[in-house]
Amino acid sequence: MIVAANLKTNLTRKETREYVNAVENFALTNSLTQDIFVFPATSSLDTFETKVTVGAQNAYAVQNGAFTGEIGLDHLDEFGIKTILIGHSERRHILGETQELIAQKFNYFKELGFTIIYCVGEPLEKREAGTERMMEYIDAQYEGIDTNYEKLIIAYEPVWAIGTGLTPTNEDIVAIHTELKKKSLSPLLYGGSVKVNNAQEIMALENVDGVLVGSAALKVEDFCQMVTFAEELDKLV
Ligand code: PEP
């Protein structure tokens, strides 16, 4: 199973180091074998010698250059970062990233052999428009994306569930994940208001290969608890 923490615009570099160390120590002490990812804020990136995979929340599809406010490959290479989150709904809907730009980033980092956690998901009005319209919307988020890329992990994150405390029903998660598995056999995470009290049952659902956690991951004990749930579920298989 895969358990990933998106720290968003939280935790300073010092706090991030403490966070990653705490997760690493927890995983070692408890002999956990899950794939753990942490995505710190850009200015908190650093060299981490740990089994926890530290990735970037964003980078521009360039080695370096005149792209004010962005970072490029050089900045990731400095810290040995080979994992990136692409297509997150906050970048699509708040920062206005288009599918074209997202696909460009995807292809750039794919060519470099990065592990890519690629996010898809519908806003509420698309869900309310019915399954067909919703799936059309999600389908468009696969445009320009190589769904057979061997280092691809997909995260299904309904926009209306992110940071709201709302989640789809378990039946809805299974239905959408089953559809998305037809598009790509890559590991498929669920994200959107995953917390300690629902992580276990969500991870146990069919076609759910792990979770991408935002707000609830900020409490490191809670994130570690979710990794433990993943470990326990793996042992049952
Ligand atoms: C996210 O931002 O990827 C996310 C899933 O956020 P939250 O867990 O806060 O809904």
Image: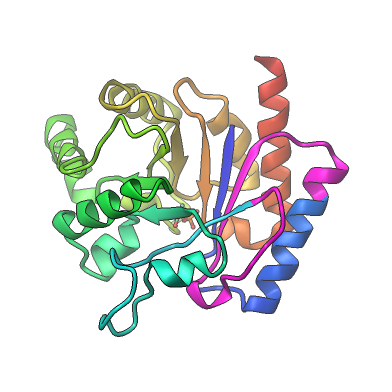
Q: Where is residue 111 in the image (x, y as percent from the top left)?
A: 32, 47
In the image, taking residue 99 as reference, residue 206 lies left or right, namely: right
Which residue appears at 13% of the width and 30% of the height?
Answer: 132
Q: Does the magenta stretch include residue 1?
A: no
Q: In which quarter of the image is residue 99?
A: bottom left
Q: In which quarter of the image is residue 149?
A: top left
Q: Position of residue 125 (x, y in %)?
A: 18, 49
Q: Where is residue 171 in the image (x, y as percent from the top left)?
A: 40, 24
Which residue appears at 45% of the width and 39% of the height?
Answer: 190
Which residue appears at 26% of the width and 71% of the height?
Answer: 95
* Quadrant where the N terminus is found in the figure: top right
Relative height, residue 53 to residue 96 (above, below): above
| Farthest residue, direction right | 29
In the image, taking residue 150 as reference, residue 193 lies left or right, namely: right
Nearest the eye: 57 or 196: 57
Q: Position of residue 31 (x, y in %)?
A: 82, 36
Q: Can residue 111 be seen in this view?
A: yes
Q: What stretch is highlighted in magenta?
A: 26-52
Which residue appears at 63% of the width and 77% of the height?
Answer: 13
